[in-house]
Image: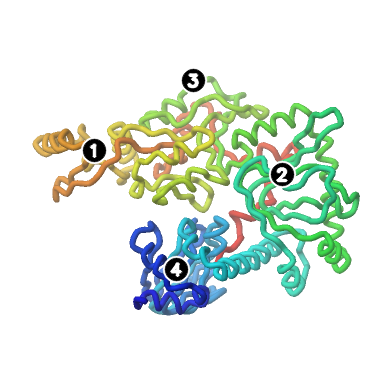
Amino acid sequence: MSALGEKIASIPLFATFTPTQIHALEDALTREPGLRIERYATGQKVCVKGQYQLELCFVLEGMVEAFAEAPEKGAGAVAGFGAGDFFGELGAIGGLPRSTDVIAATPAELLHVPRHALRYLEVNPEARKILADCYRERAVLVAANQTELFQGVADSVIAELIPRCEIQRHDARGLIVVKQGDIADSLYIIRDGFVQVVRDNGDGTHRVLAYLRSGDYFGEMSLFESQARYASVLTAGKCELIRIPHEDCLALCRRYPQVEKRLREIIARRHEEESRITPELSELLEKSGQLGVIQSDALLVMNMDLCIHCDACVRACESLHGESRLIRNGVQIGKYLIPSACRHCNDPKCMNSCPTGAIERRPTGEIYFDYDQCIGCGNCAIACPFDNIAMIDTPTFDRAQARKGRIANRNFFRPYPLAAHDAVDEKWWKRLLSLRRNKRRPVAMDARTEAVQYVPPSFPIKCDLCDGLPFMGCVHNCPTGAAMRIDAGELFESVGAMRTEARIRKTTGTND
């Protein structure tokens, strides 16, 4: 075994790995994108709070510390990790953003394992169990600390509850979590994602009663009113749930009367909300879920009371990006039209399909392309269930990037060193064209070093809220103020179909 292999094998999680499994991980370090070993100087940031750095980090040497608040503000470390420790499992496994800054307390060496490379760890049953147990413990602790249901419950009681809980993950929309009429045996907390609550009627029809999101819970009615499930609950996309057995919930209610009081208040409120869900609203809710409106983190909407149908928003988008990334038709909720554009989904299929990690998410939820990592494969366009990603030919893309660069007075990614209309060295441009004609695939040549690099024939584009520009073209160019950005929950909260205050995922949940 190599020196690196011996160093990895000394980490407790790898204690039961066979030499073959260690060798497979060593080999993957040379070819898997993102799987790497990095050294950090004292004081250097390892992880940044709020960023979607979805990777598991192992400390090989040295010491790192996690800070909930910036150290320069006088805040102390909330946790420390030494050689053999690991952190970041809630991000690598659960897809959550960093909630702390992690800074090297001494010179340190870390092994970074991105979520797509976790298979090299989970191939070992013991390591898989350690990760699962650690993930469950930290996930339940976060949910208990951030969910109103558990306010006032002692930490020791939560610790006793953790081994009784089960983490359930679902990767698709429409899967049945609980079925109406079945005998209930558990309460569920939504750790991440969305679920749809549906009640069947005696005439064979059904009504969508609500969408629940991170921080909400369901199954409380069967605790006190009936042992049978009042309604069915289906996944509304990828989601993660914490299942707590009924007997543990009832024991908690006996020990903490305020918990039972909160549950009964939720039951009363949901009965009231159900009475306001008309068949028409139910149909709209169902359609909105199918189109990804409910599950979005950032929506472009148009106030149809103000819209004059001038298409200035569409033209502005085309001018900035080479091709319009929004279509002014779609589902209408009240006075708001939701045009066809990127939803910045809670569960982005495009991000999960990218082989190079070129699709990233900002702390506020916006999804954007890191074109420096893009190879133009088109996987994201294929994976998008709403057809909101298009592949645009490279010359058109290049001209649009040049235009944005002039507007913002900054550098944007350029697939060519210079666009044709910007070239000042005519001989250089002719050499480039000649080189491209003699190749089967597009290439670019740096004018100074004459280094040849591969250029994809097309690049993906989608609505990224005009990332890098000082304004959003569609919103900025609307003459009446009809176009605006809004959180999906705000559209539905008024009818009782969703609560905006329930969210845990992008507020203070931790993955360190």
Residue 405: quarter of image = top left
Pick whichever of labels 2 and 3 is earlier in the sequence.
Answer: 2
- Residue 48 rendering spot, x and y as whole percentages: 47, 62
Pick whichever of labels 1 and 2 is earlier in the sequence.
Answer: 2
Q: Nearer the viewer, mark 2 or mark 3?
A: 2
Q: Is residue 81 visible?
A: no
Crowding at dot 1, Cα within 10 Å, few <14 / some 14-19 / many 20+, comes out as: some
Residue carrying label 1: 442
Question: Marks 1/3: CA distance?
Answer: 38 Å
Q: Are marks 4 and 2 in contact (CB under 8 Å)?
A: no
Query: Horizontal placement of 182 versus 453: left or right?
Result: right
How many circles with numbers are drawn on the protein? 4
Question: Marks 1/4: CA distance?
Answer: 40 Å
Residue carrying label 2: 176
Q: Please say if 302 is above or below 263.
A: above
Q: Nearer the viewer, mark 1 or mark 2?
A: 2
Q: Are marks 4 and 3 in contact (CB under 8 Å)?
A: no
Q: Are marks 1 and 4 in contact (CB under 8 Å)?
A: no
Residue carrying label 3: 310
Kind of residue indicated by mark 3: Cys
Q: Nearer the viewer, residue 304 or 356?
A: 356
> What numbered label is drawn on residue 21?
4
Query: Horizontal placement of 358 versus 307: left or right?
Result: left
Q: Image quadrant for the N terminus?
A: bottom left
Pick whichever of labels 1 and 3 is earlier in the sequence.
Answer: 3
Q: Nearer the viewer, mark 4 or mark 2?
A: 4
Question: Marks 1/2: CA distance?
Answer: 48 Å
Crowding at dot 3, Cα within 10 Å, few <14 / some 14-19 / many 20+, comes out as: few
